[in-house]
Image (cartoon, helix red, strand yellow):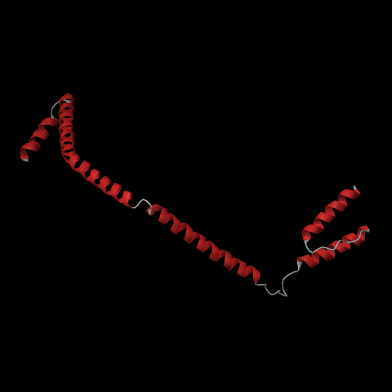
Amino acid sequence: MADLLTKIESLRTKPVSVRNRYAFWGALAVTALITVLWLTTLPARFDDAVALQKEAQAESDSSFAAPFARMRETVSGALGSLKQQLGALSEEESAAPAKDPNMLDFEAMVASSSERVYEEFGEAPVATSSTSTVATSTATSSRSTR
């Protein structure tokens, strides 16, 4: 170890071109060592990969329908869940909510205000159950008066 440290100290005193040459050959030697180690272990890795591929092939040949069965289970589960949600939604819609006395009745407000507008302009009010019909009849009346 002491010899290595003295060698490094003697290299520090040499010119830059000599130090670069030592750095190049040292890096090349380390790279070559790593490459040799990698190449020696490569066949074992290929053997493992081939064995795993053969196992997977045998497994897929024996259970060709397995992915389709999983897909069928997933789709049937999703459809069952959708049916449950739709059933719960229809139950919520079918249960008529009790009218809250504090809530405003917009249909009654629109009907009464439209009656006043029609009376003012001298036209008979149209009996409607929704605001969209009132708006449509109002637009039609305003077009005909222009």
Locate residue 51, reporting x and y percent.
23, 46
Residue at 17 percent of width and 31 percent of height: 28
- Residue 116 in the image: x percent, y percent? 88, 63
Depth check: give the residue in front, 73 or 8: 73
In the visual, does 143 lie left or right of 85? right
Position above or below: 62 against 80: above
Eyeballing the image, is 42 above or below 124? above
Residue drawn at 81 percent across, 54 percent down: 136
Image coords of residue 60 (percent x, y): 33, 49
Residue that appears at 48% across and 57% down: 75
Q: Residue 93 appears in which quarter of the rendering?
A: bottom right
Seen from the viewer's position, the closer of residues 80 and 118 is 80
At 62% across and 67% down in the image, what residue appears? 90
Query: Residue 91 appears in which quarter of the rendering?
Result: bottom right
Location of residue 23 with respect to 65 vertically, above or below: above
**Quadrant of the frame with the N terminus:** top left
Q: Position of residue 120 (x, y in %)?
A: 92, 60
